[in-house]
Image: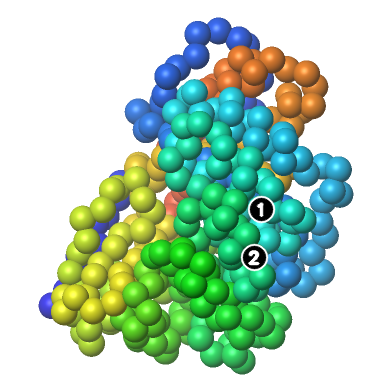
Amino acid sequence: MSIHVPLSAVCSPASKTAVPAGRPGPLPARLVDGLGRTIDSLRISVTDRCNLRCVYCMPEDAHFMPRRELLTYEEITRFVRIVVPLGIRKLRLTGGEPTVRRDLPELVRQLAGVSGIDDLAMTTNGIFLKEMARPLREAGLQRLNISLDTLVREKFFEVCRRDALDKVLAGIQEAEAAGFSPLKINAVAIRGFTDDEILDFAVLARHQAYQVRFIEFMPLDANNAWERQKVLPGREIIERIHARYPLEPVQNSRKEPATLYRFQDGVGGDIGIIPSVTEPFCEYCNRIRITSDGKLRTCLFSVRETDIRGLLRGGAAEEAIAATVAEAVRTKEPGHRINHPDFVKPARLMHSIGG
């Protein structure tokens, strides 16, 4: 039996024009872009630093921004308070690796106290979760996504350049004990690397009731090693798992990046795929991003940015900042263009953008 993964529309070119600063004026009750997509999700990168050096994310000798260039927790919280009246309801903390930033639970506590936020989540590599899972939970963090590309120690070192698999697994256990449920496990799927572990991840989902999500390898790697033949399509992953453990689709919102499946026998958690390359979901995109140095990006693959930090530190009124965000969203890119010959890779690497 073949399970069909819905195919999204082909994405259109992204503008390279800088977004104007905007002026105070009537503000929308919702952030809606030029294609009618409603934006209600904000991804917040709190640092470009990381305790791993994953080959698809950053170079071994990565250079990081001076700390003074990073948004303070107070600046981040102020920005969130400005965009909530525009319809932002979901926040996700990313990095780099967010847990390497000092006193992260304090930021979580501040954001959890912002009225109007319905969902506060974080993506992490899990290394520090053994120590931080409970403090983060107590501070108000609601959900966790944990990156785990392999279950084999030697392969973990190969892709992450650090021998830390045991710490990640211990962190996952502690996160579960702290009450994070369901835990989402993110695995970047790379042809020639992930193929022989697809069923092992399926077993993990069945035995631990995790939501295991396979993310197609995207062209944001540090060494420019991305090649289309290295992309392991989500459709193939689902069909391979289905042949051993029959799956059925889960009805979920098109706004969510993952297409979900559950096991037909009712055992365990879910399997998800995020087919960013082979079947992009740009037409349903509902998110924007702010980098750790305060640049607003309306697409992961944006070639333009809007300087929010300059406004925050330059004394701009909240109405002016809100207007700037609304204008940036109005001209949000139709899509990332990965599947087109005119695709332009962003100058920033993944760790500097925020996952």
The residue depicted at 38 percent of the width and 54 percent of the height is: 257
- Out of 158 and 205, give the one closest to the viewer: 205
Above or below 52: residue 300: above
Residue visible at 58% across and 80% down in the picture: 170
The amino acid pointed to by label 1 is: Pro
Q: Which mark is residue 134?
A: none
Circle 2 residue: 132
Residue 355: image x %, image y %? Answer: 57, 56
> Is disc 1 in contact with disc 2, using a CB cutoff of under 8 Å?
yes
Q: Is residue 225 visible?
A: no
Classify mark 2: helix, strand or loop.
helix
Residue 105 — which label?
1
Residue drawn at (43%, 40%) of the image: 118
- Seen from the viewer's position, the closer of residues 275 and 25 is 25
Q: Is residue 324 left or right of residue 336?
A: right
> How far across and how far down the image is residue 32, in percent?
41, 26
**Colour setting:** rainbow
In this view, which residue lies farthest toward the front? 138
Q: Quadrant of residue 168?
A: bottom right
User: What's under tag 2, amino acid-wise?
Assistant: Met
User: Dividing the image into 4 quarters, which one contains the N terminus?
Assistant: bottom left
Q: Is residue 332 above or below residue 221?
A: above
What kind of element bears circle 1?
A: helix
Q: Quadrant of residue 125?
A: bottom right
Q: CA distance from mark 1 to mark 2?
A: 8 Å
For mark 2, does the 10 Å Cα neighbourhood hold few (<14), some (14 to 19), or many (20 or more) residues? some
Question: Is residue 200 shown above or below 340?
Answer: below
Neighbor class of circle 1 (other Cα within 10 Å; few <14, some 14-19, many 20+) is: many
Residue 92 shown left or right of residue 320 in the figure: left
Query: Residue visible at 67% across and 37% down?
Result: 76
